[in-house]
Image (cartoon, coloured by chain):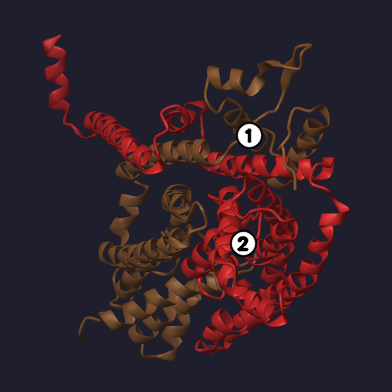
């Protein structure tokens, strides 16, 4: 499998649309086109092997199933994962002669996606930094009262940032990287230690993604309980995700009512009149 | 003078500006500020005829803003209603009150959004989609595109107009006691879903075994571990990563590098072996 300049350019445009400050907006860009699963479909269509694209997308999506970016701190760049990582992984899997549905293919995709995604954070900071220039222009427009120009600042000029930090890197990496990964096969045999390490890391990496999410939802040790109940339902009882979600609803309902009851109790002495308090004392 | 009212058309325009452009001109210095400015502009233009009044109103929204953009729609809706009240000369509503309120909303909204939307809703939809796409079918990806975008668009629209309708009452609801109870309940769903996502999709296994002289394995470590608790090794690795990041403040990138080291050592020692051949 090779990637032509035109194919690489199409992937470059998707990279512009999909990144965290992406030109397709947050919901359509970052959270739709940027998700590796969707990226896998797009790359599969562009490179002409939808099945392989989807398989790579599924594998990488696992690593980033919950890519939280609290306060704009980014640990991986979605445009790099989805539109540089997936195409290169597809080429690598084909050149290694792996079956698209094999575990080996998935592990290779995970390792490659994570590597590219992590390095890709450079692109994120590049885009955000260049946007400072447009924002600076925007502040002058605000001062002068040229408010209409703010639309250009917010929707137009960032395209220049993306041309430099999304389009060109994707174009070059996809075009040149494809040749590089094809030569990997001879350089690194499958049963050698480097490839074994790469595949082992591929299986471990989703743990980091899950842990980032846990960091967001776990405040005290008690918050691990729901996590382990969910884990047990799936691992030991083999329930699927939707079934687990349904079961979790009953607990959510309980906790909601419990919390509301606590609130009502806490509010009662403060809001209640002093006469009620006297009554209580007389009863005793 | 007749009471000023923002037309439905202008509200929709403002909402769409936010829906599309909340992060398009992102920088580390002013994250969603320009998204906010472009969302408020149609409203300010409709409410104030005089240029000076427009300039004064727009000045309010030059303050830093950043939150979870999906749920953040509600904040834009709330400020639209406050701006309308200010244009009608309501007492006690000025730049300072609007900005105080915006600043107070950023944190709680980001908390709700990150755990509810990014932490729970998206992993659930993705989890279902991944199941549908197992084997290389595009159905899962298409399912995700449709379901997520419908939920995001209509959910954000609902939040925006609810915020506009309720005005500052929405703030109390979001950060008040009931809001806290809802956040707690959602957190339970989130925790359980993440747990099942981990058990379903993540699998760390060891190939370590002890063999007798005849070359027959008498101890297969993976089987022993699964007999104790299915998925024990996977759960252990997740908790280890969480501990490194949450308790030791190690960045995700460094944790990943550490995993590379662990994997390398494990492969050399024969603890891990993906067992692959051409």
Badge 2, how many Cα within 10 Å: few under 14, some, many 20+? many
The residue carrying mark 2 is: A78
User: Which one is nearer the viewer's eye here, A19 or B266?
Assistant: B266
Chain letter of mark 2 equals A
| Residue B62 visible in image | no
Farthest residue, direction top: A284
Q: What's the residue at 76%, 17% (across, down)?
A: B215
Spot occupied by residue A93 in the image (x, y as percentages of width and height)? 70, 57
Q: Name the front one of labels 2 and 1.
A: 1
Badge 1, how many Cα within 10 Å: few under 14, some, many 20+? many
Q: Position of A13 compared to A246: left or right?
A: right
Q: How many marks?
A: 2
Q: Is residue A153 above or below residue A53?
A: below
Spot occupied by residue A217 in the image (x, y as percentages of width and height)? 49, 40
Q: What's the residue at 71%, 74% (across, down)?
A: A3
Q: Position of B147 compared to B28: left or right?
A: left
Looking at the rendered image, the quarter that the C terminus of chain A falls into is top left
Q: What's the residue at 84%, 61% (across, down)?
A: A183
On whether disc 2 and disc 1 are found on a single subunit, the reply is no
**What is the distance, in whole Å, between disc 2 and disc 1 at their CAs?**
24 Å
Q: Colour of chain A?
A: red
Q: Is residue B30 above or below residue B265?
A: below
What mark, if any, has residue B116 been given in the picture? none
Q: Colour of chain B?
A: brown
Secondary structure category for the residue under label 2:
helix
User: Which one is nearer the viewer's eye here, B51 or B153?
Assistant: B153
The residue carrying mark 1 is: B204
Spot occupied by residue A157 in the image (x, y as percentages of width and height)? 62, 83
Q: In which image quadrant can residue B256 be found? A: top right
């Amino acid at each position: 499998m090779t990637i032509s300049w035109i194919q690489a350019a199409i992937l470059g445009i998707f990279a512009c649309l999909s990144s965290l400050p992406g030109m397709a907006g947050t919901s359509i860009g970052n959270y739709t086109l940027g998700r590796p699963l969707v990226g896998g479909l797009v790359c599969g269509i562009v490179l002409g092997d939808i099945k392989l694209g989807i398989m790579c997308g599924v594998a990488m999506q696992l690593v980033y199933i919950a890519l939280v970016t609290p306060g704009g701190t980014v640990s991986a760049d979605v445009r790099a994962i989805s539109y540089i990582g997936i195409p290169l992984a597809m080429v690598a899997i084909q050149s290694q002669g792996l079956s698209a549905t094999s575990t080996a293919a998935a592990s290779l995709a995970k390792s490659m996606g994570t590597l590219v995604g992590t390095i890709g954070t450079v692109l994120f900071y590049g885009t955000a930094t260049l946007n400072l220039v447009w924002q600076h222009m925007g502040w002058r427009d605000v001062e002068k009262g040229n408010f209409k120009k703010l639309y250009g600042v917010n929707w137009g000029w960032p395209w220049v940032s993306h041309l430099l930090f999304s389009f060109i890197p994707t174009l070059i990496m996809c075009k040149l990287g494809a040749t590089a990964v094809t030569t990997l096969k001879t350089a690194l045999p499958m049963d050698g230690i480097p490839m074994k390490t790469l595949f082992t890391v591929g299986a471990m990496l989703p743990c980091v993604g899950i842990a980032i999410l846990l960091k967001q939802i776990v405040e005290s040790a008690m918050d691990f309980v729901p996590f382990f109940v969910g884990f047990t339902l799936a691992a030991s009882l083999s329930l699927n995700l939707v079934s687990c979600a349904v079961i979790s609803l009953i607990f959510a309902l309980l906790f909601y009512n419990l919390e509301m009851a606590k609130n009502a109790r806490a509010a009662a002495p403060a809001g209640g009149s002093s006469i009620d308090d006297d009554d209580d004392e007389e009863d005793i | 003078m007749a009471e000023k009212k923002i037309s439905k058309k202008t509200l929709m325009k403002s909402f769409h500006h936010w829906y599309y452009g909340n992060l398009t001109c992102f920088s580390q210095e002013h994250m969603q500020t320009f998204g906010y400015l472009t969302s408020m502009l149609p409203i300010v233009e409709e409410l104030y005829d005089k240029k000076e009044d427009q300039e004064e109103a727009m000045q309010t929204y030059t303050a830093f803003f950043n939150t979870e953009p999906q749920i953040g729609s509600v904040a834009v809706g709330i400020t639209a209603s406050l701006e309308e009240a200010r244009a009608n000369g309501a007492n006690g509503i000025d730049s300072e009150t609007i900005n105080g309120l915006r600043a107070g909303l950023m944190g709680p909204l980001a908390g709700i959004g990150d755990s509810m939307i990014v932490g729970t809703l998206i992993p659930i939809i993705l989890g279902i989609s991944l199941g549908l796409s197992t084997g290389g079918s595009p159905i899962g990806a298409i399912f995700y595109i449709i379901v997520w975008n419908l939920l995001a668009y209509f959910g954000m629209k609902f939040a925006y107009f609810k915020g506009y309708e309720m005005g500052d009452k929405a703030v109390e609801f979001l950060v008040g006691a009931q809001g806290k109870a809802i956040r707690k309940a959602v957190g339970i769903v989130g925790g359980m879903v993440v747990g099942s996502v981990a058990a379903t999709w993540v699998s760390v296994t060891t190939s370590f075994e002890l063999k007798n002289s005849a070359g027959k394995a008498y101890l297969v470590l993976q089987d022993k571990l699964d007999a104790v608790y299915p998925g024990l090794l996977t759960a252990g690795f997740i908790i280890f990563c969480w501990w490194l990041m949450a308790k030791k403040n190690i960045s995700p990138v460094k944790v990943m590098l550490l995993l590379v080291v662990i994997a390398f050592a494990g492969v050399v020692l024969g603890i891990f072996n993906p067992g692959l051949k051409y």
